[in-house]
Image (cartoon, grey):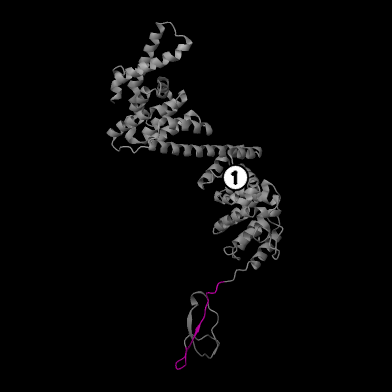
Amino acid sequence: MRSGRSLRGSDAGLFLFGPHTDSSLALIPPPGSQPFFICINFDEKERFDPTQFQESIVQGLNQTGTDLEAVAKFLDASGAKLDYRRYAETLFDILVAGGMLAPGGTLSDDMTRTEFCLFTAQEDLETMQAYAQVFNKLIRRYKYLEKGFEEEIKKLLLFLKGFTESERNKLAMLTGILLANGNISASILNSLFNENLVKEGVSAAFAVKLFKSWINEKDINSVAASLRKVGMDNRLLELFPANKRSCEHFSKYFTDAGLKELSDFARNQQSIGARKELQKELQEQMSRGDPQKEIIAFTKEEMKKANLSEQSMISMIWTSLMSCVEWNKKEELVTEQAIKHLKQYSPLLKAFTSQGLSELSLLLKIQEYCYDNIHFMKAFQKIVVLLYKADVLNEEAILKWYNDAHLSKGKSVFLEQMKKFVEWLKNAEEGEKNRRTRHTPPRPEAAQSLTCRSRKRRAGNADRSLCSSASEATDT
């Protein structure tokens, strides 16, 4: 009586065996014989042993040498024979460094290695582009390697201190090309924020080579889009230690390295971040009902710190003003609510509309807001008239907006609303000119005072009747 031969897959399990007279295996015992049971365990996992795998890859690379077309064909064919899924890390270690990497980035001494790999290749962009094609073809052929390849790049970035300067440069150029081609996600850059790499300046130096090759393949807009996608657009300053983590230092470092477009991008991102924080704080101050004098003083100080223009500031103030209120859903009530709210905060708006461009920026924000929030569509003209009366907007800005500076959003609706008021403004301006021609021109020092009196007189007239035709417009 013999025991059964090895069984695999769906044949594994519990079997009945009995005596037999020939060489075949008897699964069912003959009548009258005593059966016995044998339990065979086929679930034991194969031991992880990359040695043989490494020898096969190294031997193939030694045969192909520096012919990267031949390397790509060898890797393509070997995937059918070797377990790439199980030994992905080993495969990528060999292709990059020539052999398996020990913790820290050094090559394992007891392993076979090859001299034909990324780290021993020529240090130029053309060669790195050719290597990028090898990785690209391999991953397109074996899609399951995508995740493992990205993990490999993350690991290699953490090992940067263990590589020579030349090896780091090659890896940086390759990584930039892979990022540009979309072979890996920009999230791998998180490894560069490692404290030890940052502290010793390795991260910043590596980033210079990486971004140069990335921008060379695409452009700064592509870089920006990829960084935003993974939330890295506001973290570039973290490439430097805390005592050097400023926009000025970043800008100088990368501008000197020939990456002014990256410096400008980082500066712009810092400005956007500062604006968001300022807008959030303004909204909170308004929600709390802080005194407007305090809000104005705070805003002017922050505006100076962030080097913001008055045009940018008035746009932020408008957004904060309209975000700190829970608006009525009924169209007939929301206009009254808005007028009351804006009348209260007109001194704040006036403090940041000392320039014609600022007034025009405010008008455009009002137009955009009324268009985007349908309940405010009919409130546009009333808001503009209110701000004219409050001396926030002057006739020049309103006429400029009406004639050629308006947005396309809701253009026909808003221009129709403003038609009668604009006619009144033109008539009032014409009347003012006629009055001036009948009198001696004012002295230069009195010109500003006269202009203020004229505007107040017009605002008073607008408040009473807007010269009859404007009063109809206010009710529209």
Q: Is residue 66 left or right of residue 273?
A: right
Quarter of the image with the N terminus is bottom right
Q: Is residue 41 left or right of residue 328?
A: right
Q: Residues within 10 Å of mark 1 (few under 14, many from 20)?
A: few
Quarter of the image with the C terminus is top left
Residue marked by disc 1: 242
Magenta span: chief secondary structure: loop
Label 1 amino acid? Ala
Residue 363 seen by the camera: no
Q: Quadrant of residue 337?
A: top left
Work out whether residue 72 or residue 55 is closer to the camera in this orientation and state it: 55
Residue 128 seen by the camera: yes
Query: Where residue 231 appears, x then y in whole percent?
Result: 51, 46
Query: Where residue 46 appears, x then y in whole percent?
Result: 57, 71
Query: Where residue 355 appears, x then y in whole percent?
Result: 47, 23
- Number of numbered tags placed on the structure image: 1
Residue with the most extreme bottom position: 32
Q: Is residue 386 left or right of residue 19?
A: left
Q: Is residue 404 above or below residue 40?
A: above
Which element carries disc 1, helix, strand or loop? Answer: helix
Query: Where residue 265 appears, x then y in whole percent?
Result: 56, 38
Q: Is residue 137 left or right of residue 430?
A: right
Work out whether residue 216 or residue 308 is closer to the camera in this orientation and state it: 308
Q: Is residue 36 magenta?
A: yes
Q: Is residue 438 above or below residue 341?
A: above
- Provide the residue span drawn in magenta: 29-45
Q: Is residue 448 magenta?
A: no
Q: Residue at x 48, y 30 (%)?
A: 300
Q: Is residue 264 above or below residue 189?
A: above
Q: Residue at x 30, y 38 (%)?
A: 329
